[in-house]
């Protein structure tokens, strides 16, 4: 097993690009379907007719060398012979109940079952064992099947309680929507051609990937993240079976192993909503939580620091206002009148500036030092938040470069959120530094011996949040 070939992430990128070609706005579905197949899991595509669900499944077949293809549209009138093969007449002559499975689902590697929940109970019960154990009961014998992945398609999630066990066999549930208005012109311009076929994944490579997956480490940080996700889905009244949690971890490890990593990374957690959501409507809630809480893809608000900056800027505005006593006010008015009516604007500016400088309030050294000291404390707190934020942004940037499975749009969203957070905090710190410089340059009167002023109030308790 040590000499088994390893899957090159570059090859997988090329394979993903081929699968995506011409499938507009299907980046999520393509990646999830291919990753599910590599992990030995099944994927359910949920969406209206005409949204390229079958086209995606057919392309998946060509991603695996030697994988035989099987496809059926199921209805309530479908019979087991359509999926599992006709009864063997020769076996019946020998009092044996066996099917001729060649060319049917029990011999397929990749299968597409359209309208999968419309099948009757006889078919669904047989599919349960086939999907889960990769085994098929043919007469009195149970045969192993070469099934890699079943791609199911449905217009809606089943509400019937009797279908829930079968529904749970699909680890990944992926909504597929019509192309957006932004992509409509590109949709009409598609020519239907495919790029050169990428080198398919061999059975030996799949086997090697499974071995690598089993060696992937799930570190304490990821265990904590999964525990938080479990609490969140429980609060959302979403039921997730123990089996599904174990399968989800297997998918995360497959994503890590196929990316050339020996441990599950935080960046792999974008997969969680597709594994945990019971209904398509829950996907947005779960995705928002995962992106914001586990991936940090939420712009920083820094409300406490914003309040501090605004409070100090307001205080500086108050403390640098000119004194408006009667004598000086009269002189200012006279200066404006003389400059404007008799001697021109140049003289007016000189006289006015001189009087304004004389009217500026002057503070003792103790007052200025107190203001600057309090600002230094706030700046120190802000820098304590800035350093780990920079470290997280740098770590996320590095992780995004290695994020083989992450859709480009989501990768850009995560990167932009971290960049916005940094810009927000750095801009607030720059404003604090500017107002500190303003306080430090206020005129000092050595004769003033007033005590230090009361600190600027700005809800300091929030600074530790």
Image (cartoon, rainbow, N blue to C red):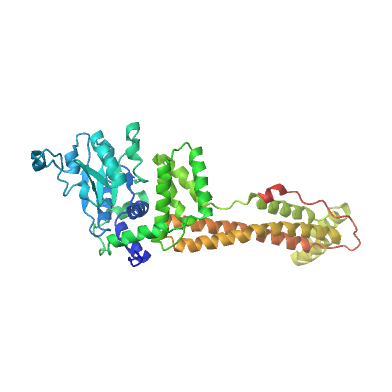
**Would residue 90 appear left or right of 308 to someone viewing this image?**
left
**Would residue 306 appear left or right of 351 to someone viewing this image?**
left
Q: Quadrant of the N terminus?
A: bottom left
> Along the line of sight, which residue is nearer the eye, 382 or 433?
382
At 37% from the left and 52% from the top, the residue drawn is 28
Q: Quadrant of residue 432?
A: bottom right
At 22% from the left and 39% from the top, the residue drawn is 74
**Would residue 352 appear left or right of 166 to someone viewing this image?**
right
Height in image: 383 above or below 232? Answer: below
At 75% from the left and 67% from the top, the residue drawn is 346
Place of residue 162 in the rendered image (x, y in percent of width and height, measured from the top left): 32, 32
Place of residue 419 in the rendered image (x, y in percent of width and height, measured from the top left): 54, 59
Q: Is residue 221 visible?
A: yes
Q: Quadrant of residue 430?
A: bottom right
Q: Is residue 156 visible?
A: no
Height in image: 234 above or below 252? Answer: above
Place of residue 364 in the rendered image (x, y in percent of width and height, measured from the top left): 86, 60
């Amino acid at each position: 097993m040590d000499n088994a070939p390893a899957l090159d992430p570059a090859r997988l990128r090329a394979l993903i690009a081929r699968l995506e070609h011409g499938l507009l706005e299907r980046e999520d579905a393509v990646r999830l379907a291919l990753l599910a197949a590599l992990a030995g899991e099944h994927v359910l595509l949920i969406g209206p007719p005409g949204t390229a669900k079958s086209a995606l499944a057919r392309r998946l077949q060509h991603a695996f060398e030697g994988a035989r293809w099987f496809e059926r549209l199921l209805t309530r009138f479908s019979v087991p012979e359509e999926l599992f093969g006709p009864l063997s007449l020769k076996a019946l002559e020998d009092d044996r109940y066996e099917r001729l499975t060649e060319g049917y689902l029990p011999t397929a590697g990749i299968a597409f079952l359209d309208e999968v929940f419309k099948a009757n109970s006889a078919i669904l019960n047989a599919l349960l064992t086939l999907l889960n154990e990769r085994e098929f009961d043919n007469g009195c014998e149970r045969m192993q099947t070469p099934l890699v992945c079943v791609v199911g398609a449905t217009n809606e999630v089943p509400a019937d309680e009797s279908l829930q066990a079968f529904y749970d066999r699909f680890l990944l549930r992926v909504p597929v929507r019509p192309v957006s208005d932004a992509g409509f012109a590109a949709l009409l311009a598609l020519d239907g051609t495919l790029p050169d076929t990428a080198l398919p994944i061999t059975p030996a490579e799949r086997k090697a990937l499974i071995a690598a997956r089993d060696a992937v480490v799930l570190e304490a940080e990821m265990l904590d993240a999964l525990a938080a996700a479990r609490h969140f889905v429980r609060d959302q009244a979403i039921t997730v079976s123990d089996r599904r949690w174990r399968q989800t971890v297997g998918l995360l490890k497959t994503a890590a192993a196929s990316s050339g990593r020996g441990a599950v990374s935080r960046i792999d957690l974008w997969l969680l909503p597709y594994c945990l959501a019971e209904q398509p409507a829950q996907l947005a809630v779960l995705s928002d939580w995962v992106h914001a809480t586990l991936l940090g893809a939420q712009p920083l608000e820094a409300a406490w620091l914003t309040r501090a900056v605004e409070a100090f800027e307001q205080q500086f505005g108050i403390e640098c206002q000119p004194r408006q006593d009667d004598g000086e006010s009269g002189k200012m008015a006279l200066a404006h009148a003389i400059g404007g009516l008799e001697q021109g604007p140049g003289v007016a500016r000189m006289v006015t500036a001189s009087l304004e400088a004389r009217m500026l309030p002057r503070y003792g050294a103790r007052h200025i030092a107190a203001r600057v000291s309090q600002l230094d404390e706030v700046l120190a707190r802000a820098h304590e938040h800035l350093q780990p934020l920079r470290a997280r942004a740098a770590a996320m940037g590095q992780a995004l470069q290695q994020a083989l499975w992450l859709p480009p749009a989501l990768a850009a969203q995560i990167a932009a959120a971290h960049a916005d957070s940094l810009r927000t905090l750095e801009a607030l710190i720059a404003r604090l530094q500017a107002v500190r410089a303003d306080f430090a340059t206020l005129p000092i009167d050595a004769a003033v011996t007033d005590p230090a002023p009361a600190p600027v109030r700005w809800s300091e308790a929030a600074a530790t949040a």
